[in-house]
Image (tube, rainbow, N blue to C red):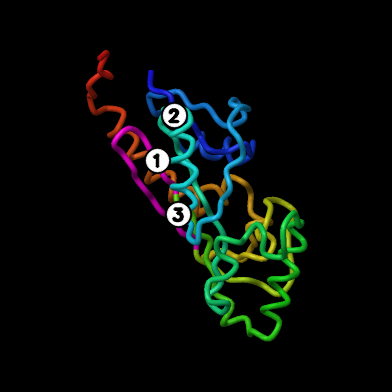
């Protein structure tokens, strides 16, 4: 059975991704199962670059197909910041609260109707002779103060289109069914199903 490495050590993210890829005829392992693989710096300038960078490096180290993603929040009024720096918006090794406070500070003079935002996720799959990207978006708006205690990151500030609650107020089931990661990995699941069902020549013994 084909093995695919998930480029994450985050238990919550791993559970979410595995639920979205359920039913595929393969075996998934995560970086939590592979402590010998070092941390990979995400120093690309786009989500696509970071996702590919992680998947390429893990494939290069293991010669095993790898699946990675990068995601973040893009706010139109801030020229799509924080973007790839979503986790480090207020600096290195900061808390979610620090990032949220900085975001609200930058939006302090922006009226509610101009606080449009979107979460974006790019997933990358790398295998011998294969590099494939999928993207997922969840559009909404940023409110003026945090609400809710579920989720993480910018979830208490983000109200997705079609809802009155923030991501941090919605149930995990609803959030996961409409999230940017849901859309990216649902699309990736369709690609992986075809990939896994395509016969391949065994490696040459020469």
Q: Are marks 1 and 2 in contact (CB under 8 Å)?
A: yes
What's the magenta bit mostly, secondary-structure-wise?
Answer: strand
Pinpoint residue 63: horizontal percent, then vertical percent: 41, 28
Circle 1 packing at 10 Å, graded few (<14), some (14-19), many (20+), is many
164 w.r.t. 22: above or below? below
Q: Quadrant of the C terminus?
A: top left
Q: Which residues make up the magenta segment?
A: 123-138
The earlier-in-sequence mark between 1 and 2 is 2
Residue at point 43%, 24% (across, down):
3
Question: Distance between the Cα atoms at labels 2 and 3?
Answer: 20 Å
Residue at point 67%, 65% (across, down):
157
For disc 3, the marked residue is 49
For disc 1, the marked residue is 125
- Specify whether residue 164 is painted magenta: no
For disc 2, the marked residue is 4
Instruction: Report how many numbered discs are placed on residues in the image.
Output: 3
Does dot 2 land on a helix, a strand or a loop?
Answer: strand
Pinpoint residue 159: horizontal percent, then vertical percent: 60, 65
Does dot 1 land on a helix, a strand or a loop?
Answer: strand
Circle 3 packing at 10 Å, graded few (<14), some (14-19), many (20+), is some
């Amino acid at each position: 059975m084909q093995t695919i490495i998930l480029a994450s050590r985050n238990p919550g993210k791993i559970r979410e991704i595995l639920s979205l890829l359920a039913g595929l005829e393969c075996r998934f392992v995560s970086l939590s199962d592979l402590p010998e693989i070092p941390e990979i710096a995400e120093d690309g300038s786009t989500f696509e670059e970071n996702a590919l960078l992680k998947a390429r490096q893990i494939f290069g180290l293991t010669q095993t197909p790898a699946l990675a993603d990068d995601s973040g929040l893009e706010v139109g009024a801030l020229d799509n910041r924080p973007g790839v720096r979503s986790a480090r918006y207020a600096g290195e090794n900061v808390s979610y609260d620090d990032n949220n406070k900085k975001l609200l500070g930058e939006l302090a003079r922006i009226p509610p109707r101009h606080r449009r935002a979107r979460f974006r996720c790019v997933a990358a799959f790398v295998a011998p002779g294969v590099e494939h990207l999928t993207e997922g978006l969840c559009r909404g708006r940023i409110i003026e103060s945090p609400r809710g205690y579920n989720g993480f990151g910018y979830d208490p500030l983000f109200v997705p289109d079609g809802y009155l609650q923030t991501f941090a107020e919605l149930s995990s089931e609803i959030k996961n069914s409409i999230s940017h990661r849901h859309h990216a990995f649902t699309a990736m699941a369709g690609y992986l199903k075809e990939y896994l069902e395509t016969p391949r020549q065994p490696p040459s013994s020469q």
